[in-house]
Amino acid sequence: MKSKSFAGMRCSIAGALELIGDRWALLVIRDLSLGLRRYDDLRSSTGIPAATLAARLKHLEAGGIVERARYQDRPPRDEYRLTPKGRDLWKVSVALREWGDRWDASGYGQPTVETVDRDTGRPLKLALVDAETGIAVKPARIQLRPGPGADDTIRRLLDPASGATS
């Protein structure tokens, strides 16, 4: 069964999901960000069926997230690399991993990857920071408000007087 398209929906999350595709695509993005480049390596790492991998790579390429680069002419062989747009998904990957670690989503009880400061070795965690000062903001201080592209539905959802937010 084909999923409903989010194309045209006035929501950045929906638009991002439309570009990324599905859960297989996120694993491909994960592996590309870890340094894998070749089709067989991606397939081996994820266990993804060949036809599914080919389709996800084409989808990610069409969305500007992945690019192909020829590394051999005879026979022709390509490798895959994240574009700047694709590399910028690292925050999404870190957020998903941190959430999965916190709630033991893998069921193995321990994280398989840790994010640490290269110089100190101390653990790092993703945070929202004040764009002007660079200082992390506590979750209790975070508020959503309608942006310039908001429609009436979003304005109603984010209007504290409407009672629609918690």
Image: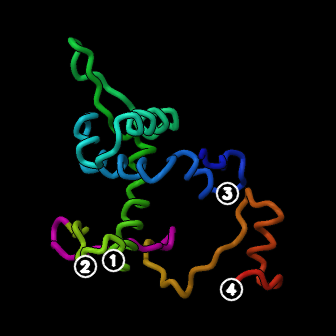
Label placed on residue 104: 1
- Secondary structure under tag 1 reads loop
On screen, residue 109 above or below 18? below
Residue 102 image offset from top left, x and y in percent: 35, 79
- Going from the N terminus, do you reach mark 2 or mark 1 first? 1
Q: Which residues are magenta?
A: 118-133
Rendered view: 121 above or below 52 = below
Crowd rating for badge 3 (residues with CA inside 10 Å; few <14, some 14–19, many 20+) = some
Residue flagged by tag 4: what amino acid is it?
Answer: Ser
Q: Distance of mark 4 from mark 3, alpha carbons? A: 20 Å
Classed neighbour count for the residue bearing mark 4: other residues with Cα under 10 Å, few (<14), some (14–19), many (≥20)? few
Q: Is label 3 in a helix, a strand or a loop? A: loop
Residue denoted by label 3: 11
Give coordinates of residue 118: x percent, y percent.
18, 65
How many numbered marks does the figure carry? 4
Task: Classify residue 86 by image quadrant.
Answer: top left
Q: CA distance from mark 2 to mark 4?
A: 32 Å
Tell me if 136 is positioned left or right of 111 in this view: right
118 and 33: which one is in front? 33
Confirm whether the magenta stretch covers residue 95.
Answer: no
Contact between labelled residues 4 and 2, with CB atoms less than 8 Å apart: no
Main secondary-structure element of the magenta-colored stretch: loop
The mark found on residue 124 in the picture is none
The quarter in which the C terminus is drawn is: bottom right
Distance in Å between CA atoms under marks 2 and 1: 6 Å
Q: Measure the alpha-carbon separation of dots 1 and 4.
A: 27 Å
Q: Secondary structure at mark 4?
A: loop
Q: Earlier in the sequence, mark 4 or mark 3?
A: 3
Q: CA distance from mark 1 to mark 3?
A: 29 Å
